[in-house]
Amino acid sequence: MLYFIGLGLAKKFLTQASIEAMRKVDVLYLDAYTSLSCDINKEYLEKLLGRQIILADRSTLENNSKNIIKLLKEGKSVGIATIGDPMIATTHVSLATEAKNKGYNVIIIPGISVHCYIISKSMLSSYKFGRSVTVVYPYDKILDTTPYEVIKDNSSRGLHTILYLDLKEGKPMSAKDAISLLLQMEEIKKEGIITPNTQIIIGQRLGCEDEEVKALTISEALEYKYKDPPHIIIVPSKNLHYMEVEALKCLH
């Protein structure tokens, strides 16, 4: 049996179901690359559960899924614990479908995801969110402008955009770095999607005791003093309901 176990964003969001599942599986992995928490890590979970945990990187879950399938074939139960909700990551969806197609039982234990959390904290209308996208670091000096295109498309339909921020060697991108990349995209595209007056919402250390959700303009965000990552960004639509306008005022 294969378990996908959502841990939520912080210790206080761990559920009884997730703890019980982590204790009973034969082999337990902790996804170490799709998301981060301010206070959940391998050491904490091993102490809480009284058992060994294997830290899984991208290669373990994405390129070497055959090793997990092999464990299932041997009759062992396997758990993959992840910060937030396990099915937000497409890697987990791919592994779950592969296991089910091979005849193995798959159990999904949901957790509070950063996606749902930031929507709630932003107080924007949940039904007005479009496609989400990740701002990634340039590769070989080439900047991926997909986030710009997604923001443009969502905005044209009156929809808000959630921007996830890249991880590089386990280090999360800061909101300030992401904003700098968005401005570079604007320099390339020159379509006026990202301007100094563009309104954004920045979530910092969500789920932690020192979390902060702040509405700023791009120019304000460049000068803002941030808490340590993880961060996440919302680019609201310009077509705001009057209640959303009031919500942004509360966050400014």
Image (cartoon, rainbow, N blue to C red):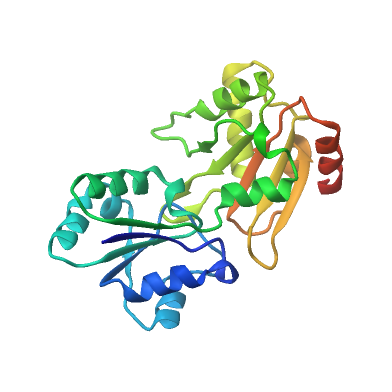
Residue 105 x/y as whole percent? 27, 56
Q: How many marks?
A: 0
Residue at 30% across, 71% down:
25
| 78 left or right, relative to 49 | left
Residue 141 is at least partly visible in this image: yes
Q: Quadrant of residue 170?
A: bottom left
Residue 7 position (above or below residue 192): below
Residue at 27% across, 64% down:
78
| 243 left or right, relative to 147 | right
Image quadrant holding the N terminus, namely: bottom left
| 166 left or right, relative to 2 | right
Residue 25 position (above or below residue 236): below
Residue at 73% across, 52% down:
213
- Closer to us: 119 or 148: 119
- Closer to us: 197 or 46: 46
Residue 144 x/y as whole percent? 47, 29
Residue 55 x/y as whole percent? 33, 65
Residue 174 is at least partly visible in this image: no
Residue at 55% across, 43% down:
164
| 157 left or right, relative to 48 | right
Q: Residue furthest left?
A: 74
Q: Quadrant of residue 208?
A: bottom right
Residue 38 x/y as whole percent? 56, 65
Q: Quadrant of residue 91?
A: top left
- Closer to us: 166 or 50: 50
Residue 165 position (above or below residue 32): above
Residue 223 position (above or below residue 27): above
Image quadrant holding the C terminus, namely: top right
